[in-house]
Amino acid sequence: MNKKSQTKSNTGDEPDNISRRNFLQGSLKALTALAAIELGAAGLLFLRARSLDGEYGGIMTVGKVEDFTPGSVVEYEDGNFFLVRVEDGGFMAVYRRCPHLGCTVQWVAKKQKFFCPCHAASFDPYGEFENQPVARALDTFKVFFEDDMVKVDTSQMRTREHHSAQDISYQS
Amino acid sequence: MQNTKLTWIQKILVKDKKERKNIVTVANNLVMHLHPARVPAAALDFKYTWGLGGISTVLVVLLGLTGLLLMFRYDARVDYAYLSIQALETQIQFGSLIRAVHHWSANLLVITTALHLLRVFFTGSYKQGRSTNWIIGLVLFFLALISNFTGYLLPWDQLAYWAITVSTNLMSYIPVIGFEMRNFFLGGPQVGQNALSNFYALHVVFVPFLLIIILSYHFWKVRKNGGISQPIQKENQRVSYVQTLPNLVRVEYAAALVVIVVIVLWSMIKPAPLGPIANPFNSPNPAKAAWYFLGLQELLLHMQPLAVLGLVAVLGGVLVLTPFFDKEEEDIGLYFRSPVGKRAAMWGALLGLNLTPIIVLLDEYWIDLLAWMPGVPASISTGWVPFLTTLMVMAVIYAVFRSTRVYQTKKANHSEAVLGVFAFIVVALLVLTAIGIFFRGPNMAFVLPF
């Protein structure tokens, strides 16, 4: 397009009319924006998809029911949980990861508490939280029984706000 | 190469032949082109800038060079990362030294850029059209932290693993997008190979690339804004100029040499730390973040993560917005604005120095928000309550500065009051950091460092 026709088309009598040049320029901008969005979305999807699968294992058999004395806490490093047998004989599998910021909690037998070394969160043997950094109890795994054996389903983690009696499993 | 000729006006202004030659040299030299041919004599006053921008630049160059060398020897796979660092430390000639220079330069960069930020804030150097460069500078500071943070994971030792676990989990508390965001950066729900690959790519390509581009813009903008900030001249005063070559360049060379010598000597005495290999099943006790995040970690002991994030966001937002609400220009280039500002800053700092340890101790031994507010959700009692209280304290400090006679008969204006609150925040953060570094032992309980 030479200069003359350009000025003519830009200063047309009807201002509503979009000149061919303006239209092409506008379309180019819109297409560039679209391409940028597409590239961004493709990049996000490219990076995201890798690991959406779970971090947990399957069902673990941990031992005979009688092997655990009431009031005991046993750590299972492979399963990432503590098996707690509460005083009245019920079982809980308490996930070792602190619900605060993900550190591994430790069982301190002397104080009968779980302690997180990262931000001093502490939990009672039921996993209930006791001080300010955290806002929820330790997560648990489902415990069930087969032929007098204690089994823990580590494929699914159960989150909870507070401890409740329903979180404890009993051998019927 | 193109050759600049002096214009006739420069020829009239500059009589000295040697000076003319120097001006041509500056104009024809790429590196020298960062500077104008002549700078105000007052801008060379070391006690004004402390050379912090320049020192940071030297550190960035050092980091680039040593980082490149380290890349040749580092293996970003979880099974080999730690081994490759061990090899650097024990087998490879100069491996330990190069890693130490990289490590200490990175740590020092956090300090020098933070001090640079403080210098610019305390001299009001974000005024007179410098608001854009102030924000660019904040972005650069953030990038320096991100580089440190992403580099922290690479040695794959216990320190690295748990520091990154904790800080990325912190991210998951951001409302709505936090959880997705953390999983995106880690490439999964936990720190593993995907996280290492991500952090490696971010650390060696993405962040440095951004840094170089934005840093160039930062430099260019300093010149575009008419050089570094200076106090406004009285009417009959004339600014005296000196030649960049040799006056400014000489100072820069000297500062760069001192920085390099200090870093290398220090690195020879103290190699970069390397803990035991990462063990996802066992957090060390105590598990501490990198030292520059320990102030935040200390805050995390007292309130919920979202409250801490909220405070950081508020502080960041206020820093970004500062130049748009503090527009009084007559105090630019003066440390602490005025005698009033000086006094406000002093009071703010003293308050931060005293109030912070008192509150930390009270919270440790007496305050128990959860027990005091039974039935109230923890997100309120240990989230909103401490968050709003902290903001309230700052608002009260501001209001007091505005309404009382801070210095002689004068009350603080907005700029001076903000300065006082800022001094309070800075000192409070420093105190929190010191508590986190020196006074926290196993189970994050209080210990004495001596």
Image (cartoon, grey):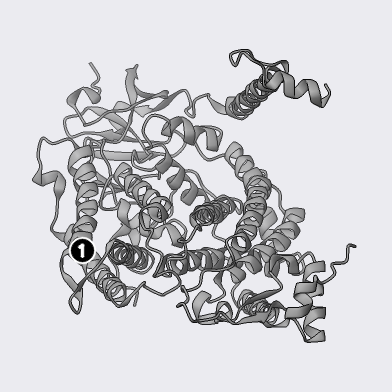
Residue at x 26% of width, y 67% of height: B352
In this orientation, does residue A172 appear?
yes
Image location (x, y in percent) of residue B218: 60, 57
- Quarter of the image for the C terminus of chain B: give it: bottom left
Q: Mark 1 sits on what residue?
A: B402
Left or right: B26, with A98 as reference point: right
In this orientation, does residue B89 appear?
no
Give the mark count.
1
Residue B100 versus residue B4: which sits nearer the camera?
A: B4
* Rendered position, A124 above or below B368: above
Mark 1 belongs to which amino acid? Arg
Left or right: B396, with B78 as reference point: left
Residue B74 versus residue A167: which sits nearer the camera?
A: B74
Image location (x, y in percent) of residue B390: 23, 53
Left or right: A70, with B371 as reference point: right
Residue at x 17% of width, y 42% of height: B381
Q: Quadrant of residue B42?
A: bottom right
Image location (x, y in percent) of residue B197: 64, 41
Residue at x 72% of width, y 82% of height: B246
Label 1 sits on a secondary structure element that is helix
Residue B157 versus residue B334: which sits nearer the camera?
A: B334
Image location (x, y in percent) of residue A170: 23, 21
